[in-house]
């Protein structure tokens, strides 16, 4: 029986994910319901995916085996507590999970209900290696993200470092386009993580470089992503990683950590 997927957020990422799942790239899964504050946008995706428009989150949860959020950090905060513990939950706007109180609440509810919370790797590669390294001691992790200024909502004359700080600070300052820093933070566990964001007018790609050192040795992983055609603030790989997560959930043979 196909895994029934409910989607929160019917924008560019939601449409990309639904299209891929409809084409069979998400394994034995199907979209059964969608939800968005913009009813017109929800109606368009429902029609494309041959699914229904949920009138509220409770209805979306009832209709689904798994709920996939691809809306915003605010959506995770508002709807996450109503989902966790009732159905499996895939969180794209992972920056919201750096709120310790929210994270604790969602994990507690998921445990009590016997459900899982999944965080796709998003637009950055190398998290499987970092996760493995975390079994031992990781001394330091550094994420350097370089993007065109427009995607960051900025205007600069030349290559400019616009942020240096922690993942927690990064997701607050750039909530729509630096969720990768949260994914790195959650994967790195207790290791110190430093984030540097660079705005470069000459950049044509969204670039993420992860460096880590620890008792395992050193890890260096660089990802050069094409921006999403429909939403330049995010990378095309972000939607692909969500589809891959869903496919992984449906598979019998699991490869990787």
Image (cartoon, grey):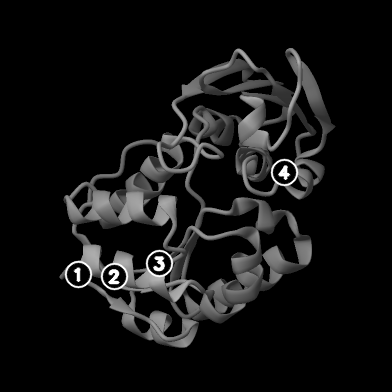
* Picture residue at 44% right of the left edge, 26% below the top: 226
Marks 4/3 in contact by CB < 8 Å: the verdict is no
Q: Which residue is mark 2?
A: 46
Point out residue 176 in the picture as x, y percentages from the top left corner.
63, 47
Q: Measure the C-alpha gap from mark 3 to mark 2.
A: 9 Å
Which element carries disc 2, helix, strand or loop? helix
Point out residue 145 in the picture as x, y percentages from the top left corner.
65, 26
Q: Measure the C-alpha gap from mark 3 to mark 1.
A: 14 Å
Q: Which of the labelled discs sits on residue 174, or is there none? A: 4
Q: Quadrant of the N terminus?
A: bottom left
* Picture residue at 42% right of the left edge, 86% below the top: 55
Q: Nearer the viewer, mark 3 or mark 2?
A: 3
Pointer 3 or 2: first along the chain:
3
Pointer 4 or 2: first along the chain:
2
The residue nearer to you, when weighing 136 against 228, is 228
Q: Measure the C-alpha gap from mark 2 to mark 1.
A: 6 Å
Q: Which of the labelled discs sits on residue 50, or is there none? A: 1
**Residue 13 visible, this orientation:** yes
Q: Which of the labelled discs sits on residue 241, or is there none? A: none
The tally of labels here is: 4
Q: Residues within 10 Å of mark 3 (few under 14, many from 20)?
A: some
Q: Which of the labelled discs sits on residue 41, or is there none? A: 3
Looking at the image, residue 118 lies above or below residue 125: below
Marks 2/1 in contact by CB < 8 Å: the verdict is yes
Q: Residues within 10 Å of mark 1 (few under 14, many from 20)?
A: some
Q: Quadrant of the C terminus?
A: top left
Q: Nearer the viewer, mark 4 or mark 3?
A: 3
């Amino acid at each position: 029986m196909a895994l029934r997927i409910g989607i929160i957020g019917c924008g560019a990422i939601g449409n990309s994910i639904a299209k891929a799942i409809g084409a069979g790239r998400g394994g034995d899964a199907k979209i059964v319901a969608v939800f968005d504050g913009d009813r017109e946008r929800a109606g368009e995706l429902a029609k494309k995916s041959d699914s229904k428009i949920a009138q509220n989150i409770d209805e979306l949860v009832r209709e689904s085996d798994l709920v996939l959020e691809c809306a915003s950090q605010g959506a995770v905060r508002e709807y996450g507590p109503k989902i966790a513990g009732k159905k499996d939950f895939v969180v794209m706007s992972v920056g919201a999970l750096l709120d310790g109180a929210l994270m604790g609440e969602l994990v507690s509810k998921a445990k009590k209900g016997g459900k899982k919370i999944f965080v796709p790797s998003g637009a950055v590669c190398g998290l499987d290696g970092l996760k493995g390294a975390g079994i031992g001691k990781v001394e330091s992790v550094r994420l350097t993200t370089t993007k065109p200024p427009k995607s960051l909502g900025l205007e600069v004359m030349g290559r400019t470092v616009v942020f240096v700080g922690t993942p927690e600070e990064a997701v607050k300052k750039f909530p729509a386009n630096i969720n990768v820093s949260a994914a790195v933070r959650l994967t790195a566990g207790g290791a110190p993580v430093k984030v540097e964001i660079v705005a470069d007018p000459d950049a044509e790609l969204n670039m993420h470089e992860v460096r880590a050192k620890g008792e395992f040795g050193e890890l260096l992983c660089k990802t050069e992503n094409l921006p999403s055609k429909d939403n330049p603030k995010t990378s095309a790989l972000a939607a692909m990683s969500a589809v891959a997560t869903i496919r992984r959930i449906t598979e019998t043979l699991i490869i990787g950590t």
